[in-house]
């Protein structure tokens, strides 16, 4: 059952449309994520769901309740929605215990104590109740902000770039911890981020936004392997779009040779297309007949990411274990490891 449902939602100021005709649903207990570059409208959409921004068109529903439409706007405090902000927004004059208990301060003190202690244990900060926010690290403050938002047991939790101020290593580990905590609590959540690794670590469902529009709502796997729009392919992961032409037997002729897959639709024979080629679609194999020249490389720890130039001057990306190092200018063999084809109409990606 859908806990959160958006239908044709638009948010704007005067003639300036920030969110444009967005539709998606999030089931109870799922964790969703809105991805996209800065200024794409994802935070504005999150604020509209929370009730801080009115919608100019469409509907937002929580469960079976309409909470936002042009004719109706349920106040934020009546939506049962929790929110974790980018800057944590902890109260500096309150202890950790008092911060976490803030949203349940009307409950009996015994129930407050039980719930706060339970959440502090969940986030790995048992015994930190008497401390103040300034005595905590950034990661610990983020955990307290999350515990405070979870204390009232909201039916929906919204997280706005919650890990952006943390270092990369801490972001990834904390994202996994947050996912586990949300699943333990049975909380439905929606995260906004520009970091796809956070999305992959947290989300059951994710969507990519661009210029206010939701380009695709899918599983993280689907966004990476089956992008429906070239901007999704460009934003999720890395890769190149290579020009090709569909042959009479529904294969694709490219600078990499003849590509075969079950993804070429019938009736497209002779059409020009652009093919998405990911680094993991190509294996550097010294015995392969297809040759290329390494023109750039980037060290990624466990592997190198290479840019290779083909005979016609086109470029592809490929990976190899850091134990097998290739020099810039070196000639290498390339072997294809494609298990499916992702095609876009030729020129579509230039518009």
Image: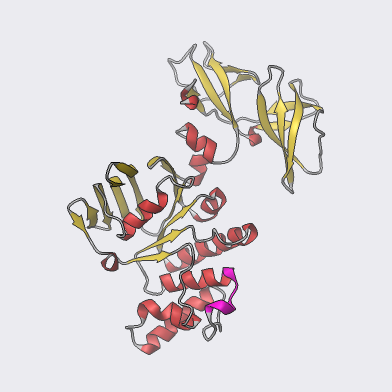
Q: Position of residue 43 (x, y in %)?
A: 41, 53
- Residue 322's place in the image compared with 348, above or below, is below
For residue 284, side relative to residue 251 (left or right): right
For residue 283, side relative to residue 104 (left or right): right
Secondary structure mainly formed by the magenta segment? helix
Q: Residue at x 54, y 58 (%)?
A: 164
Quarter of the figure with residue 282: top right
Residue 1 visible in the picture: no
Frontmost residue, 59 versus 343: 59
Q: Residue at x 25, y 49 (%)?
A: 59
Q: Residue at x 60, y 38 (%)?
A: 238
Q: Position of residue 274 (x, y in %)?
A: 53, 23
Frontmost residue, 99 versus 117: 99
- Residue 150's place in the image compared with 349, above or below, is below
Frontmost residue, 63 versus 98: 98
**Magenta-highlighted residues:** 133-139
Quarter of the figure with residue 212: top left
């Amino acid at each position: 059952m859908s806990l959160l449902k958006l239908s044709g939602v638009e948010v704007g100021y005067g003639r300036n449309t920030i969110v444009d005709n967005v539709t998606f649903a999030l089931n109870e207990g799922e964790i969703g994520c809105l991805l996209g570059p800065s200024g794409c409208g994802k935070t504005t959409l999150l604020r509209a769901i929370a009730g801080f921004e009115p919608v100019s068109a469409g509907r937002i529903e929580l469960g079976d309740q309409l909470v936002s439409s042009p004719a109706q706007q349920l106040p934020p405090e009546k939506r049962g929605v929790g929110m974790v902000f980018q800057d944590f927004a902890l109260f500096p004059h309150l202890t950790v215990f008092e911060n976490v208990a803030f949203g349940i301060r009307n409950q009996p003190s015994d129930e407050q104590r039980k719930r706060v202690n339970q959440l502090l244990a969940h986030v790995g900060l048992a015994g930190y109740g008497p401390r103040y926010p300034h005595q905590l690290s950034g990661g610990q403050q983020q955990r307290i902000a999350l515990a405070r938002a979870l204390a009232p047991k909201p039916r929906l939790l919204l997280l706005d770039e919650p890990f952006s101020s943390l270092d990369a290593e801490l972001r990834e580990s904390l994202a996994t911890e947050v996912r586990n905590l949300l699943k333990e609590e049975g909380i439905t959540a929606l995260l906004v981020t520009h970091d796809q690794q956070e999305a992959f670590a947290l989300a059951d469902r994710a969507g990519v936004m661009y210029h206010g529009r939701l380009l695709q709502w899918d599983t993280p796997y689907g966004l990476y392997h089956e992008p429906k729009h070239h901007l999704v392919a460009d934003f999720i992961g890395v890769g190149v779009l290579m020009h090709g032409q569909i042959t009479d037997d529904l294969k694709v002729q490219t600078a990499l040779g003849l590509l075969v897959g079950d993804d070429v639709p019938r009736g497209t024979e002779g059409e020009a297309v652009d093919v998405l080629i990911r680094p993991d679609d190509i294996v550097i194999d010294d015995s392969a007949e297809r040759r290329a020249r390494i023109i750039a490389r980037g060290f990624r720890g466990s592997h190198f990411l290479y840019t290779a130039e083909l005979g016609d001057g086109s470029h592809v990306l490929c990976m190899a274990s850091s134990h097998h190092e290739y020099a810039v200018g070196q000639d290498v063999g390339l072997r294809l490891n494609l298990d499916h084809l992702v095609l876009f109409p030729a020129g579509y990606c230039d518009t």
